[in-house]
Image (spheres, helix red, strand yellow):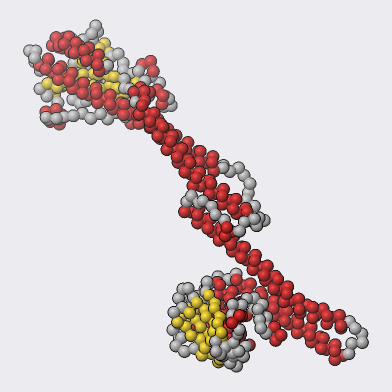
Amino acid sequence: MTQVRKKWRPPLILVVFAVCALLIAIPVVTLLAMRLTSNQFIRTTEAALIEQGAIYAQAFSDAFQALDGPMIGTPLNEELKAHWGADFHPAQPGLSLQADGLHAPRPDGVPDETTADPRYAAIYPLMIDLARGARKTTLSGVVFLDDTGSNIGGEERRSFATLTEVQSALGGQVGSILRAREQDYDPHPLTSISRDTKFRVFVTYPVIADDRVIGVVYLSRTPTNLNKFLYRERAGFLIMVAATVSGTALVGFLLLRLLSAPIHALKNNTSAIAKGKTSPSQVSAHYGTKELAELGESVLSMADTLSQHAQELSIYTDHVTHELKSPVTAISGAAELLELEDLPAEQRQKLLGNIRSEASRMNTLLGRLREMTKMRGQQPGGPGRLMDMMPDLQGLAVLAEGLSGVTLPISAEHGRMVLYHMAQNAQQHGADEVRITYSEGVLRVADNGNGLAPSDANRVADPFFTTRRDMGGTGMGLAITKAILDIYRAELNVRPNDPGAVFEIRFHKV
């Protein structure tokens, strides 16, 4: 018996549990791995700093231009002149932790010994008061730089002109960068995702006056983190978690309901069928999916077929035992008589003839039985031309008119065997003529023989049934015919006729 190689295989319930765990884990892991929430928080902070920078820059420009003095600063190119001269020139946030990376903490700047334009010192108190007032709400840090990139106030003058973001602003463009906080800087690539808020967003906004960059507003702020966001949105987050867990549990229940229960029911049913405890036709089970229902139907169909074959085998065994009993008994009796020493020669020859006759009958019977068994195992063929199937028996006329173009849904070889056994059966029952007709998917074979009793009409195709047993009939010819027709799912019906009998073969596919 073929056995499945034994190895550890996860049970279905474990697979379902793993699938449900993945349903929950995949979006969470993806969210953290891609740092999508961090990017959103970063860009929200960047957008807020850009808006603040625009306000500070406008106040810076107005205050500076209100003072007398020559215009200083780096001139803008034509493209930037057009940009800043337009009625609307929004700056879109675009920082990304993956694309832009995390830079080193902002340095304190390089000491600058040069002297700044006195107008910067004049407007510094106004700007720093504005920044301090706004910071109470915005929580943003701000440094005001002159046209060279150095701070315009404070105890010591320092230059930030070497910083990338400051250079962008001095060139007339808004600059943005992510810098680690000094106490949390860790530049290695495996920095934990839990530390994604230990940095600040820096934005530099150019101060434009008369198409020149006269200064820079340098702003910074730490973006919010996921923990703070979830705490603020805890009600919605709890609802989302509850919905996710409930949905996952529902998916797991449906998987178990649609897969596990039907599979176990099918397993129990097949085990019961294998042990002969349950009739296949009585088996019923809940099948959750179309494929499982089809599998269940296939298993039950196979069980029905096996049960039918077992029943047929039992019937055939009984018939063969019964049919072989007579010739075996005759041969055994003749052998015992042949052992008598004073048996006359004439009687001895007669007994030997009986042995040969019964042995021939047994051989014929077994040959027909093998032929019928072979037919049951064959596959359907066809189609074939009806005229190629006509039987040819000496002493039997076959009448077939208007059938030259008829094609049957059966192979020519099988068709010849069917019509041969029918013609042979008719001839053995006294017929010298058979008429073959075909119309609307029904093939009719009528003979002019001795006919049959109405009570025998439903038995003529049964194995070993014969009315000519005393003449050597085996009762297997029409049984072989029926076995061939079963391959093509064709129906065989027999009815008495005057004279003879009529055999009708109904094909379901013409």
Q: Tally the marks.
A: 0
Residue located at (47% from left, 89% from top): 401
Residue located at (14% from left, 26% from top): 76
The x and y percentages for residue 425 are: 61, 85
Q: Report the side of 344 relative to 409 (left or right).
A: right
Question: Seen from this angle, which residue lies furthest front?
Answer: 455
The x and y percentages for residue 382 are: 50, 75
Q: Report the side of 480 relative to 152 (left or right).
A: right
In-front residue for pair 329/194: 329
Q: Is residue 14 above or below residue 423?
A: above
Indicate the quadrant containing the N terminus: top left, top right, bottom left or bottom right.
Answer: bottom right
Question: Seen from this angle, which residue lies furthest right?
Answer: 342
The x and y percentages for residue 320 are: 71, 73
In-front residue for pair 94/508: 508
Is residue 191 visible to us here?
no
Is residue 246 visible to us here?
yes
Q: Report the side of 148 relative to 471 (left or right).
A: left
Residue located at (41% from left, 26% from top): 193
In-front residue for pair 378/458: 458
In-front residue for pair 299/383: 299
Question: Seen from this angle, which residue lies furthest left?
Answer: 68
Q: Is residue 509 above or below residue 423?
A: above
Q: Report the side of 74 relative to 9 (left or right).
A: left
Q: Is residue 357 above or below residue 61?
A: below
Q: Is residue 40 above or below residue 133?
A: below
Say which quarter of the image contains residue 86: top left
Residue located at (64% from left, 76% from top): 463
Indicate the quadrant containing the C terminus: top left, top right, bottom left or bottom right.
Answer: bottom left
The x and y percentages for residue 413 are: 55, 79
Say which quarter of the image contains residue 498: bottom right
